[in-house]
Amino acid sequence: MKKKKGLPAAVENRKARHEYHIEDTYEAGLVLVGTEVKSLRAGKANLQDAYAAIKDGEAWVYNFHISPYEQGNQFNHDPKRPKKLLLHKSEIRRLLSMQREKGYTLVPLKVYFKQGKAKMNLAVAVGKKLYDKRQDIAERSARRDIERAIKEKGRGE
């Protein structure tokens, strides 16, 4: 039987690449309850203010908002409860040492499903300064102008 390809990202943190310099990325499993999985599959989640941290030798993600399942009953989940991340011990040790360094933070980039399991792309990142953000915007604009000029020249205008 042919395996299904992984769905595109259920939720993505688009601002993360604008706000942070991404140093390294990790793939972590997510421990979720049933109604969280259903809401996540429906795309009813928000990674905007989410961050990850290592606590007592375990990785956790905080402020990851998964909306309550619409067809759920009184046993629906708490939208902002901390969710455990599944990582190897060696990865947790590496992340812990990087987290202790000044300026480094663990930022979730996206959540997706891989072979039916919920996965989170986690980045070790350093916050950008305002001038870094402005410089990135200027570079992007210059690149766009160059590509536009090349395209127009190819048309013969």
Image (cartoon, grey):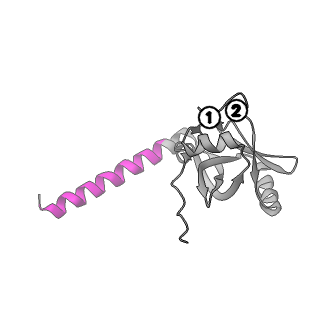
Residue nearer the viewer, 35 or 11: 35
Instruction: Name the kind of residue labelled 2 in the image.
Output: Asn
Q: Give the quarter of the image for residue 114.
A: bottom right
Left/right placement of residue 54 relative to residue 113 reads: right
Pointers 1 and 2 in contact (C-beta within 8 Å): yes
Q: Is residue 125 left or right of residue 42?
A: right
Query: Residue 17: x and y, percent?
Result: 54, 48
- Residue 69's disc is 1
Task: Quadrant for the N terminus, please.
Answer: bottom right
Disc tally is 2
At label 1, the amino acid type is: Tyr
Q: Secondary structure at mark 1?
A: loop
Residue 95 lies within the magenta run? no
At 56% from the left edge and 38% from the top edge, which residue is drawn? 44
Q: Is residue 39 placed above or below 86 in the rendered structure?
A: above
- Residues packed near mark 1 inside 10 Å, few (<14), some (14 to 19) or many (20 plus): some
Q: Earlier in the sequence, mark 1 or mark 2?
A: 1
Q: Which x, y percent locates residue 104?
A: 70, 48
Q: Please report the bounds of the magenta region as a residue range.
A: 134-156
Q: CA distance from mark 1 to mark 2?
A: 7 Å
Q: What residue occupies the far bottom of the structure in this picture?
A: 1
List x then y, in percent, for residue 108.
Answer: 64, 47
Q: Quadrant of residue 146?
A: bottom left
Name the residue that disc number 2 marks.
76
Per the image, label 2 sits on a secondary structure element best described as: loop
- Give the residue at the far top of this rendering: 74
